[in-house]
């Protein structure tokens, strides 16, 4: 065999091998691209599902906010009260939360009016003491006085849901004087009727 033929044959074999290897590479690349296309399509499907869940959550949150706003609108008319009557004439003996007969008479009259004339009112019962007590015991005594009035009004038929109590202790005296009469004025419960 001559050298030219051998070189040509070797060139042909090399070209064939390169051609075959190029085909194998192209097939491999196509296979890899197809696999990546499948992954991308799957991830796109997951993103679509994720977007759908986010849309559902957003719609649910919007509905909840709408319900909360509607409830707030309804509540505005029910919880905004203005004072229509205030009675601070219910007084107590020193260091006592016991209702006097005079206080019971006044509270009985008030309960009757609340039940007949003002069925849709709210009553805030404010307990007060004179400045002769320590702060903690003054707050406790003011609370005990307010609770005594609330219990009495309840026994007369005023619903508990229409009443609340609060103690101011000795922080808001009716009279700043230190005389026995002034101290007696400070040992009181103020009943505020609101509509």
Image: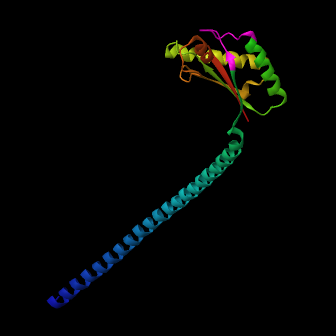
* Left/right of residue 57 with respect to residue 109 in the rendered view: left
Residue visible at 28% across and 79% down in the picture? 18
Q: Out of 37 and 88, give the one closest to the viewer.
A: 88
- The quarter of the picture where the C terminus appears is top right
Q: How many marks?
A: 0
Q: Out of 94 and 75, give the one closest to the viewer.
A: 94
Report the span colored magenta: 89-101
Q: Quadrant of residue 48?
A: bottom right
Q: Is residue 90 magenta?
A: yes
Residue 104, percent across and down?
A: 76, 14
Q: Quadrant of residue 122?
A: top right
- The quarter of the picture where the N terminus appears is bottom left
Residue visible at 16% across and 90% down in the picture? 4
Rendered image coloring scheme: rainbow
Residue 108, percent across and down?
A: 79, 18
Residue 96, percent across and down?
A: 63, 9
24 up-or-down from 39: above or below: below
* Left/right of residue 101 with respect to residue 34 in the rendered view: right
Is any part of residue 127 visible from this angle? yes
Q: Out of 67 and 18, give the one closest to the viewer.
A: 67
Q: Out of 165 and 52, give the one closest to the viewer.
A: 165
Residue visible at 46% across and 64% down in the picture? 40
159 up-or-down from 101: above or below: below
Is any part of residue 2 visible from this angle? no
* Left/right of residue 123 with respect to residue 135 in the rendered view: right
Magenta region's main secondary structure?
Answer: loop
17 up-or-down from 115: above or below: below
19 up-or-down from 30: above or below: below
């Amino acid at each position: 065999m001559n050298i030219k033929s051998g070189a040509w044959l070797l060139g042909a074999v090399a070209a064939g091998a390169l051609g075959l290897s190029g085909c194998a590479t192209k097939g491999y690349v196509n296979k890899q691209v197809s696999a990546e296309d499948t992954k991308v399509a799957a991830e796109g499907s997951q993103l679509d599902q994720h977007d759908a869940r986010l849309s559902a959550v957003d719609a649910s949150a919007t509905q909840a906010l709408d319900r909360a706003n509607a409830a707030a609108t309804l509540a505005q008319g029910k919880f905004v009260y203005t004072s229509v009557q205030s009675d601070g004439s219910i007084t107590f003996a020193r260091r006592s939360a016991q209702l006097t007969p005079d206080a019971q008479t006044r509270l009985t009259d008030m309960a009757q009016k609340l039940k007949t004339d003002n069925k849709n009112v709210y009553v805030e019962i404010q307990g007060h003491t004179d400045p002769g007590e320590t702060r903690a015991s003054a707050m406790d005594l003011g609370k005990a006085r307010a609770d005594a009035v609330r219990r009495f009004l309840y026994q007369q038929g005023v619903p508990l849901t229409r009443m609340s109590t609060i103690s101011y202790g000795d922080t808001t005296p009716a009279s700043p004087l230190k005389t026995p009469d002034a101290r007696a004025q400070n040992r009181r419960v103020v009943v505020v009727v609101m509509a």
